[in-house]
Image: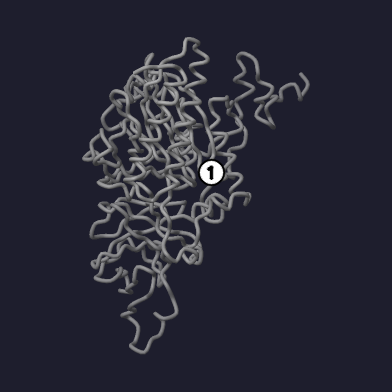
Amino acid sequence: MAPDETKPTNSKSGGRKDAVQPYSGYLQRTPPAPEHHLTEVGPGTPMGEYFRRFWHPICLSEEIGDVPKNIRILGEDLVVFRDKSGSVGLFQPFCCHRGAHLENGIVSERGLRCCYHGWLFDVDGTVLETPGEPPSSTLKDKVFQGAYPATEIKGLVHAYMGPPELKPHPPHYDLFDVPGAAFAPFSTPFPNNWLQSHENNVDPVHTVFLHQRITEQFGEPWAVLPHIVWDVTNNGDGLTHLDGRRLDPETVWIRFVHTLVPGCSFIPSTWELGAAPLYYQRALYMRFTVPTDDENTNVLGWRVHGPGFPGGDAALMGPGRTDMEGQVDRSDTLSHEEMQRTPDDFQAQGTLWGGQTLPFHGAEHLGSSDRGVTLMRKTFRNILDGKVPEAFPKPATEEPDGARPRLNYSFDALVNVKALADEKADFDMIGALGRDMADAAMEVAQSTDDQGLRDQNTKAAIKAVEAAYQAKHQVLR
């Protein structure tokens, strides 16, 4: 046999294009190179530096006790603490004096004291005391402990890890201003790259199969394949997808989901919505995909509850838990085989391309139903190429009156529009109905900062769309 006859055809490219044939495992055994540009988040990487332009939740306030807590975010090991005056600090882990680990630091009335030589650091890294030095020493005026700005927002500790001169105001979202809204914080760690978890938010088809037809987690209506329309917002600072479903001959369910860069998603209800009409129900979950490092992710956020936010149980929220099914590691309560028989997001996302590794995007075979995934990757590539200035937060110095609330457009609606006799025509009509409802909701959202008025006007606008479709199709209620 000639030497070159033993050489596999996939030795350079992975053989994916040549392997369109049965039993092609031999040709596909070597995967292509993993994705680096969009997935690596350490210091100095393109995506890592983009993430660092934003504030991110890093842990729950309740996780910070009377001793420092080790934490890892964006590939950096850090120490978070709250001093006795209530201020939160986020330090690089090693004391700038001799390198003692500050997880052993002593929480003080102001700042954190190193256990080794007693140096005291304020939350901004200022050296307040060097007690072992002589009184005349000016050493403390010449050094700083590495520190990042940190603050607490509704039970979540947020941090900014980017260039100091570009620091934006801490985030403010429109849901914060909804009358009566309350916020229960949570976190759900995943053993996979951040992009795999964030892309899950723009993949509505997985909910049909994983969350209903395979494992019944979200209720019977989720089994209906939706008419999906994807779009970008504000030239690329976010993505939307509307999912329109015919539930019965009289009822259409429109679900509109909005994500914002770099990792925000606003998820409507995952419970039964009741009977139509339901003209407007906002997102119930605010979720933030935060890279721990290149191989691990933490999804933190709030479950919104109170008037207008039904379902679920706020008491189930907290560190490592949430009231949305399918989001946490169940290995402490189920056997491996039991989890195989009832897979969920944790199993699916956590095992994509082997779990704790960079994804092999070159080995995927994306279809038209993956439009959200391709749009998201294109959006991030455009951002990193400098084509989307709208996707960067404004420095606080450019917003002297404070940051304007970031709008999210997510909602659920159930309307009464009779089915058309032709199934394809009905499917197309549902898509058009959803687009008109989404356009109406977005127009109202952009017209007022009064969130109570926004709810009122959006319900009226969606009701008007329903009436227009009823009249067009000669439906009498």
Task: Looking at this view, name the residue that lies furthest to the right.
Answer: 2
| Vertical side of 69 occupied by 250: above or below | above
Relative to 359, 301 lies left or right: left
Quarter of the figure that contains the N terminus: top right
Label 1 sits on a secondary structure element that is loop
Relative to 52, 466 lies left or right: left
Task: Looking at this view, name the residue that lies furthest to the top.
Answer: 421
* Residue nearer the viewer, 73 or 25: 73
Relative to 30, 197 lies left or right: left
Query: Percent position (x, y) of residue 426?
Result: 48, 16
- Disc 1 residue crowd, few under 14, some 14–19, many 20+, Cα 10 Å: many
Taking the spot 55% from the left edge, 30% from the top edge, the residue there is 371
Query: Percent position (x, y) of residue 394?
Result: 50, 59
| Vertical side of 265 occupied by 395: above or below | below
* Residue nearer the viewer, 389 or 412: 412
Residue assigned mark 1: 39
Relative to 171, 359 lies left or right: right
Tell me the kind of residue under disc 1: Thr
* Residue nearer the viewer, 120 or 345: 345
